[in-house]
Amino acid sequence: MLVGHGELSYYHISAHLDQKLVSAYHNLYEYTTGITLSPVNTITAYRAAELRAKYGLRTPDSLHVATAIMSGCDAFLTNDLGIKRVTEIPILALDQLQIG
């Protein structure tokens, strides 16, 4: 299962000036089967705050990871190696994946 957190994902992506990249992400979220957008509720926000305090994550990163944990994801896929210190969910780095 792939999970994003709804409005925050759109906000985070839309901050980029590269409209081609923004469009690609919007298409990914809107038209890809198997992606679930989960809103951040109070429980997820509390979990994000715990992760932020424990690991020194930036707020957006802690929200991403907390959403994955609370949604029952098997792993968290990222290109941010700083998130690898989180132990509550397996962290998979994009550049370390063997595809094909």
Image (cartoon, rainbow, N blue to C red):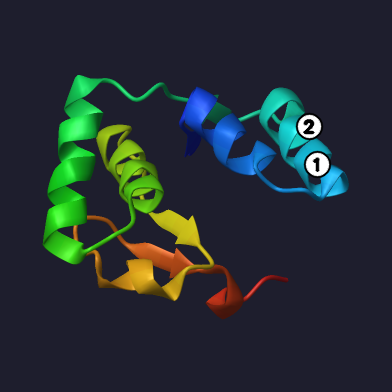
Q: Is residue 1 in view from this perspective?
A: no
Query: Residue 27 — which label?
Result: 2
Give the quadrant of residue 30.
top right
Instruction: Name above or below for residue 38 compared with residue 60.
Output: above
What is the distance, in whole Å, between disc 2 and disc 1 at their CAs?
5 Å
Which residue shows up at 33% across the image and 32% down it?
71
Which residue shows up at 57% across the image and 69% down it?
94
Discs 2, 1 touching: Cβ within 8 Å: yes
Between 89 and 39, the one lying in front of the other is: 39
Q: Which residue is mark 1?
A: 24
User: Left or right: 26 with respect to 46?
Assistant: right
Q: Secondary structure at mark 1?
A: helix
- Residue projecting furthest to the right: 20
Q: Percent x, y for residue 67?
A: 34, 37
Amino acid bearing label 2:
Asn
Amino acid bearing label 1:
Ala
Q: Percent x, y for residue 42?
A: 20, 21
Instruction: Name above or below for residue 6 compared with residue 93.
Output: above
User: Left or right: 22 with respect to 83?
Assistant: right
Between 57 and 74, the one lying in front of the other is: 57
Q: Secondary structure at mark 2?
A: helix
Q: Residues within 10 Å of mark 1 (few under 14, many from 20)?
A: few
Q: Residues within 10 Å of mark 2 (few under 14, many from 20)?
A: few
Which residue shows up at 50% across the image and 35% down it?
4
Q: Is residue 6 in view from this perspective?
A: yes
